[in-house]
Amino acid sequence: MRFARKEPTGDLYSQTSHCACAITSAVDLVSTPMRLVVARCSVVYEGRLDASLPEANRLLMRKADGCIAIHADGGAYKPLNWMNAPNSVVEHDDKWVVTNPKGETLTIYLHEVFSDSSHELGEDPGLTKDGVEAHLQELLAALPDSIEPGLTLIRREYPTAVGPVDLLCRDATGQTVAVEIKRRGEIDGVEQLTRYIDCLHADTSLGNIRGIFVAQSIKPQARVLAESRGMGWCEVDYDELRGKRSDELRLF
């Protein structure tokens, strides 16, 4: 295995570079900056299933809340592999070993490090939705049974480690339901809901969790992806939710 570590630029790394390894947890990382490492690496995941990534150049992101994400130079919304907080990290000179409370392990082998930097991003104000999408969320929070009969609201903007779930609800059987709302339903919205559900599973008090993807119109590819992941989907009429009906004729 080839290993050539170049001099990092971030303060976080300089505090641990002379140690054999550094052990941190999500609690330790609360006040630490975002860390970005560009490296030639290979990855092995051991958990619910075994998976691996062969040696290649990638971007490693270690967020202040403890989340680890591994990105390739392509695709805007989904890392190749990741591990959400809470987790613990054992950092050796040539690898990171990331373990979560479920016993899943993500081992990142560093063959060559090209850059290593840390950045204070400060508090993020969160996503500002356009008027229609924000109003859709308000309307559906007031009328959750428009999505599914018997659905009741637990909370709007339910927080997770990767952002807030638009609506957290309970269905007629008492099961927890995560709802993601978009004006236009595309594949990236399904991926976003998948990440939220992964985070929510860490909270055992919520029990079994399923998802419903909601939009004014949903592309066929997004419907297929949602169904393949055991999610429901629902198209809603904005005008009808506002108590108005469109004057235009509709085929369906």
Image (spheres, rainbow, N blue to C red):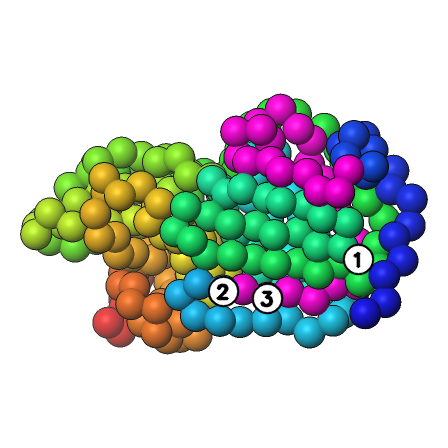
Q: Which residue is mark 3?
A: 44
**Disc 3 element:** strand
Of residues 132 and 19, the one drawn nearer to the viewer in this rendering: 19
Query: Which residue is at a point 35% across and 36% down the rendered structure image?
Result: 158
Residue 235 at x, y percent in the picture: 29, 60
Front tag of 2 and 1: 2
Where is residue 91, by image quadrant? Answer: top right
**Disc 1 element:** strand
The residue type indicated by label 3 comes to Val
Query: Which residue is at a point 27% across and 34% down the rendered structure image?
Result: 155
Residues under numbered marks 2 and 3 in contact, where contact means CB atoms less than 8 Å apart: yes
Q: Which residues are magenta?
A: 19-45
Residue 90 to residue 233: above or below? above
Q: Earlier in the sequence, mark 2 or mark 1?
A: 1
Q: Is residue 194 left or right of residue 116?
A: left
Q: CA distance from mark 2 to mark 3?
A: 7 Å
Q: CA distance from mark 3 to mark 1?
A: 15 Å
247 part of magenta stretch: no
* Circle count: 3
Q: Which residue is mark 1?
A: 39
Magenta region, main secondary structure: strand
23 part of magenta stretch: yes
Q: Which residue is mark 2?
A: 46
Q: Earlier in the sequence, mark 3 or mark 1?
A: 1
Q: Residues within 10 Å of mark 1 (few under 14, many from 20)?
A: many
Q: CA distance from mark 2 to mark 1?
A: 21 Å
Of the 4 image quadrants, the one containing the N terminus is bottom right
Of residues 70 and 3, the one drawn nearer to the viewer in this rendering: 3
Can I make out residue 183 in this image? no
Where is residue 134, by image quadrant? Answer: top left
Instruction: Report the residue that reaches farthest toward the front.
Output: 20
Residue 35 at x, y percent in the picture: 72, 40
